[in-house]
Each structure stands twice: as structure tokens, then as C-alpha cells.
Amino acid sequence: MWNRHVGRWLWRFVLGIVLVLALVLVCGQAVLKIHDWRVERTIAGFRAAPGPACVVRLTQWLAEGAVTPEQGARILTLLLQPMIVTRPAYPVGQSVGISVERPFALSIPGHRIEFQEHVWGGKRLMDTNWVSRSTLYGFPEILNAWTQPTEPSIYHARIRTTCKVISTAGRKFTLWDRLSMSLRRLLGRPPATRAPARGPTYGCQFVVPFDLKIIEKDQAERLELRADPQMDKTMRTVIAAETSDRHGAYGTPAGRRGHRGSTSVAFKTLPIAVAFELSLRLADGRELPAGANRQPQRIRIRAGKSAAFLVDVGSFGLTEPGDYAGTLVLRSDPNYAYEDPAIKAIWNGTLEFPIAFVVYVRTRIE
């Protein structure tokens, strides 16, 4: 009798545990389903009307490992879809430049982003952009989409994008982490403050095709060069050079060199795009860089933008230690401007600023 009573009690106890576990499982699945529904709703909302608020929410879920790998792939594909800008037509025999830009910067706390873009013209790889960092900025990249097409035609090209988001956090992400985070969101509670989990590695891969029209040189789009006294005066008020005692270093065939004294060129909001080739004119009339083996430093900024560029002293190719003083020359560079298809016109002017610095032999202990 006693054994029968104990057996009945144990059976009820086990049944109760099973029922509780089943209830917990069902509730947990319900919480996850609700969270997945919210993710899908946010993805659909971003697809219909992309905006910063959706970007913050989606990247937060990626950082927490709170979406499935399939959802992560779709989110990354949406965030990384490029805006490709081309010219209406390009001249035959010249390299074809395109602008590739993403509308939003991508930053996922606790993660590293490995990003690659491959530009294919026909069956040939034309250009590659590769970065590995914590933040992927949305600045436009000017990439080569075709190398000197030899005859007028419509050329088919494509950009293949590959991205991996790799966690740099410590502990392993578990299903309980995802359930806990989903439950906290459902209840309106803040996320847990303990160290973030090492969630799944998210990734995506997609291809965007585009066409390029190549025509005879005399029929292709030309860059407009503008200059008049009023515009010259305006541009000289929005572009200025600033100096500092900042140190720098660069390599030469004669060994490592350091320099004391730096110059930066600041551009306030520009009424028209600019493209410059930089050179250094010394007191004796020499202008550097000189020789076919040295490429000058260049600056290119679109209309309506502002920026600051630090002059690269190493690009002048100076190897002899000593004090240098001269003139920094910024000459209009239409060819460099034409590489950016978003630029239709530039200021066709020249700027000169005084520049001085000291070059010295840089030792290993410095």
C-alpha cells in the first residue's frame, strides 16, 4: 500500500515537472517568435523607408547575437546595398571610374567587420576594395569599373560584395542568452549589464549589376571648368592652410626620415567641387615632387562638402636633412575630378600657401 502511494506521488511529481518544462518551452518559443516578428517588422520597415533609427535597432540586434544567421545575412545585405553612380557616357580609350557609396555607416559594438568589394568588367577583375575594422564608413569610394575600353558599346559590369561580422567578445553566446534578451525586451526591461556574449558570426554576399555606356570622345560628357573673379574670391575664403609643430615620418631610398612642422588644408562647405594636385615650390624655383617615379598628392571634394587634409611631406621626396621653406601649390586637376562621376563641374583655380618644416634622419629609438 505504501509503495503504491509513493509510486503514485512520484508519477504525479514527474508529470508535473514535464508539464512545467513543456510550459516553459512553449512560453520560450512564444517569446522568441514575438522577437523574430519584431525583427522581421523592422527589416520590412527599413526596406520600405531606410532611416537611422532602424539602423541603430538592427545593428544592436547584430551586436547582441539576437537574430538568426539568415536574418543577419538579410540585414547586412540591406545595410550594405551600394549606391552606384556612373556618368551617362564615358569616352572610349579612358579608364571608367564609378562611385560606390553606402547611405549609412556600419558599426557593431564588440565586433570586427571584414568587408570586400570586387568590381568585375565582363570576366575580368577590375578593382578591389578591402577593409577590416570596427566601423565601416559610408564615404564614397571611386573604383575602376573598366580599363580603357577600346570601342564604343554598352559594357556590362557588376560589383560583388562580401561581408563578415566577427565577434571580439569573450564568452560563448547561448540559446538562453537569446531567450533572456527577448524576454527582457518583451517586458520592457533594459538588457543585462554583464559582459556581452560571443554571438554567431554573421555574413552576407550579393552581386549588383550595372551597365556602362562608352562612346566617342567628342560625344562623351565633359567636365565643366569654372572660374571668374567673384568665384575666385569666394573660394579663397572657404579654403585655408593651417600649420602646427606636429611631427611625422616617411620612408626614402636613403632611409627613414622624420619631419617637424605640418600643414593641413581646411575646406569649409564648398559652393563647387574641387580637385587639386599638390606640389612644393622651393625658394630656388624647383617644384616637387619631380620625376616620373613620384606621384603627387591629390585632393578631391564634392560640392556642398567640408573636409581637412594633412599634407603628406613624404610625397615631396626630400631626403636631405635641413630646414625647408617654400610654397605649397594647389593646382586644379580636371582628370582627377573626372574620375568621380558625381562631379560635373570644378573650380578651375590655383591656390598658394607658405609652408615650412624641418627634415631630419629618423632613428629607431624615436
Image (spheres, rainbow, N blue to C red):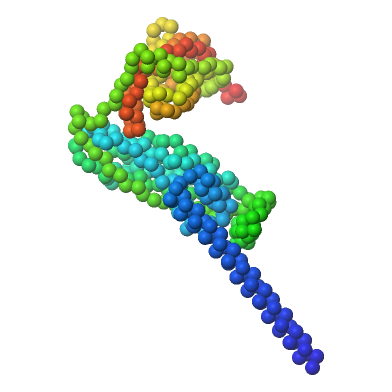
The reply to whether residue 94 is in sight is: yes
Vertical order, 171 against 254 (above or below):
below
Give the farthest residue toward the top.
284
Residue sticking out furthest to the right: 2
Residue 343 lies, in percent from the top left, at 34, 29
Q: Quadrant of the N terminus?
A: bottom right
Describe residue 18's horizontal placement relative to residue 35 as left or right: right
On screen, residue 338 versus residue 306, left or right, reads left
Which residue corresponds to the image point at 45% horizontal and 19% vertical from the top-left?
A: 238
Using the image, determine if residue 360 lies above or below residue 304. above
Residue at 43% across / 41% down in the picture?
Answer: 102
Question: In x, y percent, where is residue 208?
Answer: 35, 47
The one of 258 and 106 positioned closer to us in this rendering: 106
Q: Position of residue 38 (x, y in %)?
A: 53, 57
Expressed as whole percent of the image width and height from the top left, the position of residue 14 reads: 70, 80
Q: Residue furthest bottom?
A: 1
Residue displayed at 46% across by 50% down: 46
- Front-most of residues 276 and 61: 61
Image height of 105 relative to 254, above or below: below
